[in-house]
Amino acid sequence: MPLYITFDNQQEAYFPGQEVKGNLNLNVSSENQVSSIVICFCGIGVLQRDEVDNKETKQELYFDQVSTVFSCKGEGDTKHHFEIGPKTFPFNFTLPQKIPTSFESSTGYVRYSITAYLEESDGRLQTAVAVFTVNAILDLNRIPKSRLPCTDWAQQDVCLFCFKCGPVSAILNIPRRGYVPGEYIPISAEINNLQNKPISFVKATLVQVVKYHHKSGPKKIKRGVTEAARICDAL
């Protein structure tokens, strides 16, 4: 008796406050006796302190709502016979307004899911889980600094074995600080190579910085999201 969940929104992505609609689908291949069918809507944030053992040490629950789709409990008969064939049970749930965007990493996650439980009359329990995405709305127009340009400068002394080759400095510029997913970030760089060997290519990396807050203290994780490289004339 396979059990699975489908969403009306094929992208399976929603905004806070939006209604999540879908169907719980049940394919009955032989006559079965069912006691109850329950759906749970859950949003949770988890911080994992030990990345090796994957221990969940801190949780934050955003919502946890249970909806009974079908039940014989409380009636004279505690079981119901489903005829052979497909069965569909529609569901809907309105997301809270103030919830964070979905996020996944090896250190922690923000995850939203729907879990269905089907209890058969003999006590056996079937489950089906479907994860969906929440994209919180961020209006860059409300962040004045997002329109300001950004410039940074760095210098490093390059060494080969025990010999100093000389310094390399770079000035990096981007026209503004705020961007949305899918938007190009134009980068201009001025490189001053004072070492005694040429530079044949340059590379820029977009780094994501995530800060986790825990009672034992904050933890900051950096990871490269994407990068762009360009072969250039020897500098």
Image (tube, rainbow, N blue to C red):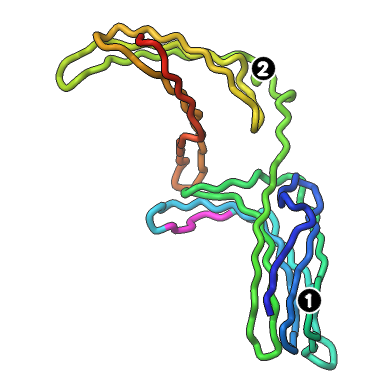
Q: Which residues are magenta?
A: 54-59
Looking at the image, residue 216 sits to the left or right of residue 180; the answer is: left
Residue lying farthest left? 162
- Residue situated in front as seen by the camera: 86 or 222: 86
Quarter residue 122 falls in: bottom right
Looking at the image, residue 37 sits to the left or right of residue 187; the answer is: right
How would you rate the neighbour count of disc 1 (Cα within 10 Å): few for under 14, some for 14-19, many for 20 or more?
Answer: few
> Residue under circle 1?
86
Front disc: 1 or 2? 1
Looking at the image, residue 174 sits to the left or right of residue 220; the answer is: right
The secondary structure making up most of the magenta span is strand
Residue sitting at 65 percent across and 69 percent down? 128
Q: CA distance from mark 1 to mark 2?
A: 54 Å
* Image quarter of the N terminus: bottom right
Q: Position of residue 143 (x, y in %)?
A: 69, 23
Residue lying farthest bottom? 76
Q: Position of residue 191 (x, y in %)?
A: 41, 10
Relative to 199, does residue 54 appear above or below in the rendering? below
Looking at the image, residue 184 sits to the left or right of residue 202; the answer is: right
- Dot 2 lies on which element? helix
As for residue 199 lying within the magenta part, the answer is: no
- Dot 1 lies on which element? strand
* Amino acid type of the residue tagged 2 in the rendering: Arg
> Residue under circle 2?
147
Quarter residue 35 falls in: bottom right
Residue sitting at 65 percent across and 87 percent down? 123
